[in-house]
Image: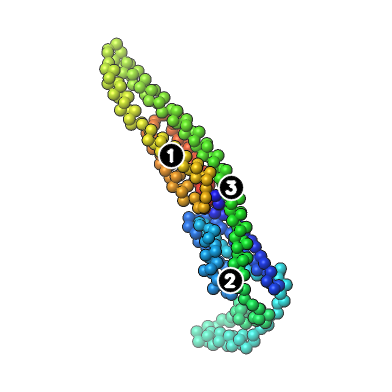
Amino acid sequence: MKSMTGYGFAQKNFDGRVLCVEIKSVNKKHVDIFFKMCRDFLSYEDTLKKNILNKIKRGRVSVHIFFDKEASSEKVEISLNKDLARQSYDLIQELLKDLNLKQEVPIQHYPKFQDFFQNPIANDRKILSVEELSDVLDSALDLFDQARLKEGACLQKDLLQRIFSVQEMFNQIEGRVDLVKNAYREQIEKNVRDLVKDLRFDEGRVLTEVAIFANKIDISEEITRFNIHINNFKDSVENAKDAVGRRFDFLLQELHREINTISSKCSDAKISELAVDIKCELEKIREQVQNIE
């Protein structure tokens, strides 16, 4: 079982330049992958995305690929392309004049035009290949996957404890079903005796009323289905492989449906109380399931 939230970071030195890959993810029903990287690597995006999809099935994944300037030993030499800067300045002034604008472009805005500045060393250096980049990405993915597995193990333990709690409360509901039927029969007989006092009453009619009520409050089918779903949920948690979050979502919906039906059919105060407690616990489980891939 894996969590949808995780973090992984890897770096590697390439001729004095330290390439870093940072991966982090948050919950989402479907998989979305977002890249933040320099222009040299934009053409690699499809290949990198395929590598990530081999390990990730759900979640919003952010991938940041960058060079660590502080850790890199590469010498940085920046020069100004004066000719390009002058031409750009003249064109901007001409545009302002054509638009009849009185304002000036502040000098601090010009450094944003990156083409004005050149790094001769950067221009001569080799662009990393997709294989070199994928190697660092795979290292980050391995650490990212380990973090998700570690958190997934904690979620698995918590889910099993909550499932056990739900099962215990549901067992109490099962144990009260016959008691509720018997109590209703006794109450009907008492009410009839109080009404007719010394008169004889039709025992068969009382049994018929009890049978009608028993049929209305019969939750045997709901009990069977609830037990099937809770056992399936437990087995899925214990033997979780690959992406199981959607399966958990479905089973929780079914468990909610059955416990709601049981609660509406039974007028017993204790069963109603237990049903509310079970629904609260199922809601806590649902919140945890939102973190599972």
Mark 1 burial class by Cα count in 10 Å: few <14, some 14-19, many 20+: some
According to the picture, the residue beneath numbered tag 2 turns out to be 130
Residue situated in front as seen by the camera: 253 or 193:
253
| Residue 150 sits above or below residue 95 on the image | above
Name the mark nearer the viewer: 2 or 3: 2
Residue at x 58% of width, y 85% of height? 88
How far, Cα to Cα, is label 3 from label 1?
24 Å
Residue at x 45% of width, y 35% of height? 275
- In the rendered image, residue 196, in percent from the top left (x then y), is placed at 29, 15
Mark with earlier residue (2, 3): 2
Could you tell me the amino acid type at mark 2?
Answer: Val
According to the picture, the residue beneath numbered tag 1 turns out to be 228
User: On the image, which quarter does residue 255 sit in?
Assistant: top left
- In the rendered image, residue 193, in percent from the top left (x then y), is placed at 32, 16
User: On the image, which quarter does residue 118 sit in?
Assistant: bottom right
Mark with earlier residue (2, 1): 2
Residue situated in front as seen by the camera: 44 or 66:
44
Dot 1 lies on which element? helix
Residue at x 46% of width, y 49% of height? 247
Residue at x 55% of width, y 51% of height? 2
How far, Cα to Cα, is label 2 from label 3?
34 Å
Dot 2 lies on which element? helix
User: Circles 2 and 1: CB distance less than 8 Å?
Assistant: no
Dot 3 lies on which element? helix
Q: How many marks?
A: 3
Q: Most extreme residue toward the top, as rendered?
A: 198
How far, Cα to Cα, is label 2 from label 1?
49 Å
Could you tell me the amino acid type at mark 1?
Answer: Ile
| Residue 204 sits above or below residue 271 on the image | above
Q: Is residue 290 visible?
A: no
| Residue 192 sits above or below residue 111 on the image | above
According to the picture, the residue beneath numbered tag 3 turns out to be 153
